[in-house]
Amino acid sequence: MSLNPRSRCGLLASALASALLALCSVAPAAHAADSDTVTIMVGGINKIIYLPAKLAEVLGYFKAEGLKVELQSQPAGVDAENQLIAGAVQGVVGFYDHTIDLQAKGKEIQAIAVFCKVPGEVELVSSKAAAAGFKTMADAKGKTLGVTGLGSSTEFLTRYLVDKQGVASKDYSLLPVGAGSSFIAGMKQDRIQAGMTTEPTVSQMLKSGEAKVLVDMRTEVGTQAALGGLYPAASFYVRNDWAATHKDQAAKLARAFAKTMAYIGSHSAEQIAELMPKDYYGSDKALYVEALKASLPMFTKDGAMPAGGPETVLKVLSAYKPQVKSAHIDLSKTYTNAFLSTK
């Protein structure tokens, strides 16, 4: 069948439009596949326990390793973890305990740099609830306790601390309230009578008199008393398969964080605070510095996993998570120090 010139032009234009549309639809995917940017999700980027992520960026350590790194933030570590599993990000700054929890679910991720030897978490009780008799975790019966998110490390730790006191899970409630201002609002509004949070929120609430400390896991002594050993927490973790196929990038990231940990160990809280964005400390920089001073001892010096730490974390999770207890957990697949020393 012959076509008149106008019809031929119309078909040609249609074909050209279809080709352009197809090209545009695949271009972003091709760009994403070829991109050398490493996206890291942080479970609350302005938390002091996760400070090494922003500090590494500010100090230029990522660039020094030849890396392009984009930092993103999620209010709860479990949300960041989900992004990692989905492949939306290449790494997560969150709690090490997720590596064990996920292995029990058939997913393998590993920490390649560890920031903190202890959780840095504090269980706060509102001053109102404390005055009414809420003095220890044994008094949690009938109360609502705040966590950053369900499935988060704050939930893991909260459940362990309450269960350890003989209070059944059916006798108390957990409420996700995030961190920072949303945590403070939850306690002020009495939606939670106690909750787990980190610095600088802890210092802020203690200074205002709105809360008191129930359990302090900012120090090794406090963590030993609460959990029976060191509990490596804030860390940088990636999928095991990604590390195996991106060894050069993994090594560069681990080195950048190792340099950051060395910097933290050799500089004062005042010097570190000077490098942080203003929105990290708001209108009270002095309070931020004090919170940072209280937090510095929790950081590792070199990004390496502390000896005995993984065993403590496994013990805590196994105490109340049947899936972890029944699984054969291979701790050697949940972390590695190998990338820290790769030249």
Image: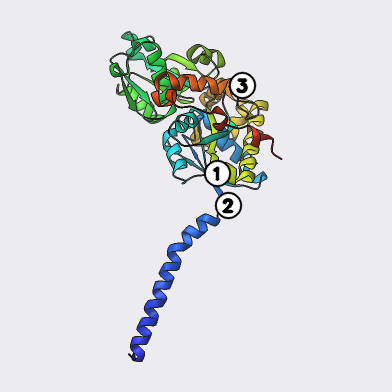
Q: Quadrant of the C terminus?
A: top right
Residue nearer the viewer, 27 or 148 = 27
Question: Circle 3 — which element?
Answer: loop
Q: Classify the position of the N terminus by image quarter.
A: bottom left
Query: What residue sits 44% from the left and 44% below the top?
Result: 86
Residue at image mark 1: 242
Residue under pointer 2 = 36
- Which mark, by number, is residue 83? none
Give residue 296's quadrant in the image: top right
Where residue 243 appears, as percent x and y from the top left, is 58, 42
Q: Which of 328 and 47 is in front in this view?
A: 328
Which residue corresponds to the image point at 59% horizontal and 46% vertical from the top-left? 245
Q: In which quarter of the image is residue 259?
A: top right
- Residue 236 image point, x, y percent: 55, 35
Q: In this view, does 322 lie to the left or right of 280?
A: left
Q: In this view, does 91 lie above or below 121?
A: below
Mark 1 or mark 3: name the one nearer the start of the chain.
1
Is residue 76 among what the camera can see? no
Instruction: Name the amino acid, label 1.
Output: Trp
Please state which of the two labelled residues, at mark 2 or mark 1, is closer to the viewer.
1
- Residues at marks 2 and 1 touching, judged by CB atoms closer than 8 Å: no
Q: Which of the marked residues, 2 or 1, is nearer the chain's N terminus? A: 2
Mark 3 neighbour density, 10 Å: few (under 14) some (14–19) many (20 or more): few
Which secondary structure lies at badge 1?
A: helix
Badge 2 element: loop
Amino acid type assigned to the residue bearing label 3 in the image: Ala
Q: In this view, does 322 lie above or below 33?
A: above
Say which residue label 3 marks.
307
